[in-house]
Amino acid sequence: MADNSDLLAFVRARLAEEEDIAREAGGDGWRTPAEAPGEVHDRTSGIAFVVRSRGYDRHIAFQDPARALRRIETNRVLLDEYEEIAVLDTDRPAQDFTSGRAVGLGFVVRQMAAEHAGHPAYRVKWLPRFSHWGPPSPPE
């Protein structure tokens, strides 16, 4: 049995941090009006801030707090699904549907954790692992 509770806790903590940041930024959708290049507006059409160079305004507006909150929620759904079967996510999984699902979701959760590989609490053992899934190899 695998204990992946530390991996789950790590990813949940990073999502909570990101959620706090998005909520502090207003939690609203941002946009960049065509008639006001460089300006990023909030949902009330007020100017949230101005960035007048190199297309940063569009990139920042695309990463708005509302979008971040939606992504965080979908990631939490994945974490909940994984948590139910995380004990089956092992280096040598059984060859059944549930074990395959555990390994697949585990790969996704490890990718989510790897996004924060520079964090001091990140552990190298969480690097996504790649394994061959299929029928056992014939004996040599």
Image (cartoon, rainbow, N blue to C red):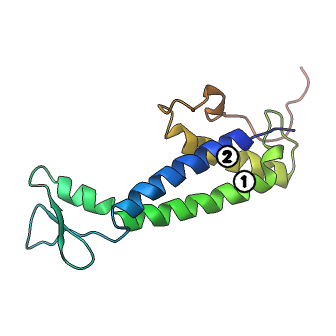
| Residue 31 relative to residue 7: left or right | left
Residue found 9% across the figure and 64% down from its top: 37
For residue 53, which numbered disc appears in the image? none
Give percent across and percent down for residue 52: 9, 55
- The number of numbered discs placed on residues in the rendered structure image is 2
Q: What residue type is labelled 2?
A: Leu
Q: What residue is pinned by disc 1? A: 82
Residue found 49% across the figure and 33% down from its top: 119
Residue found 64% across the figure and 33% down from its top: 126
Quadrant location, the C terminus:
top right
Quarter of the image for residue 35 reads: bottom left
Residues 20 and 115: in front is: 20
Height in image: 107 above or below 23? above
| Residue 96 relative to residue 4: left or right | right
Q: What residue is pinned by disc 2? A: 8
Label located before the other in sequence (1 or 2): 2
